[in-house]
Amino acid sequence: MSAVKSRSFLNRFPVFYQKFYKEWRWGPQAPVHYVPEEGKWKRNPETGEVKVIQNKPIPLTYPKEFEDGLWGGEALVRGFQKRNPLRRRAAHFWFPSLIKSVLYSEILDKHMEITVTPRTLRLVDQHYGFDSYILETPPQDLKSNLGVKLKRSLLLALAKKDFLPNNAVKREELLQKYQKHIIPLEEAEWYGLTIQEALEKLGESEQREVKAPAVKQPLKIKFREEFIQQLKAEQEEKSAPPTPKSSWNPFKFNKSV
């Protein structure tokens, strides 16, 4: 699905899902493989030539293994390398250093073995915890499917407030700690879904909302039924036996008295 078609296709989804998906797929990422320069212009100190500063991100390649890890913004860099001054440059790939590490989520109360990079571990330390790193990092920097799915699990747990059922004190402490990340449950349920998953959820919600259209009855049929009911009521009144009248007259004197 092309970018233009997918952007117009997003109009079917809720606004908060559109915001998430656009940030996830097309949002500007934090510079990792280059150092951005400040300002708009720069002068060459030797020649005095003035040039425009262009902070263009380096194109990255994401293999399928990327979706199952947290690479901290790193990915494969494809380019060329001049290995011999007398020969033409050769194509070269720069791979990130990948390691398996066990990370702990205090909200989910779970240890997880995840493929990460050294930069990911530094970011976790800078955020003083794995949950803070996941919640505070925008989706375009998490990038991987695992990253946004973990963030979705954390947001759902905070929205439902049902995590740590056996430790209410710790749960209240974490709710206060991550209060700024709590969002409505409906938004949390849509967060982190792929297009296919979002389509399935949208189809289910539309099926629940669709109701069978009410069949409009012509007025002549309605009036005919009312008239028939009225005739039946009058017929019942006519066929009912008359109420016997009492022969006792209080104003009539008894001659025998």
Image: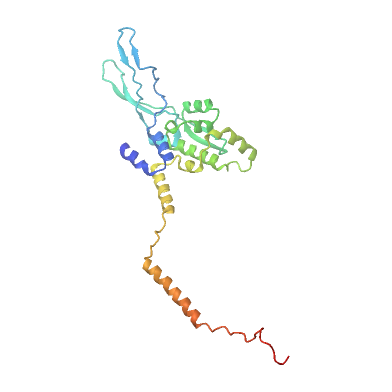
Q: Is residue 148 left or right of residue 256?
A: left
Q: Is residue 121 above or below residue 238?
A: above
The residue nearer to you, when weighing 112 against 206, is 206
- Colour mode of the rendering: rainbow
Q: Is residue 41 left or right of residue 158?
A: left
Please provide percent x and percent y for residue 195.
Answer: 39, 42
The quadrant of the picture occupied by the N terminus is: top left
> Residue sitting at 47 percent across and 39 percent down?
149
**Residue 211, image quadrant:** bottom left
Image location of residue 15, percent across then percent down: 42, 40
Decide which of 155, 187 is in the foreground and name it. Answer: 187
Q: Position of residue 225 (x, y in %)?
A: 41, 71
Query: Which quadrant holds residue 16?
Result: top left
Picture coordinates of residue 160 (x, y %)? Answer: 55, 43
| Quadrant of the rendering where the C terminus is positioned | bottom right
The count of marks equals: 0
In this view, the residue in front, 91 or 244, is 244
Q: Residue at x 49, y 41 (%)?
A: 188
Q: Give the left or right position of residue 246, taking residue 41 as reference.
A: right
Going 28% across and 21% down the picture, which residue do you hit? 89
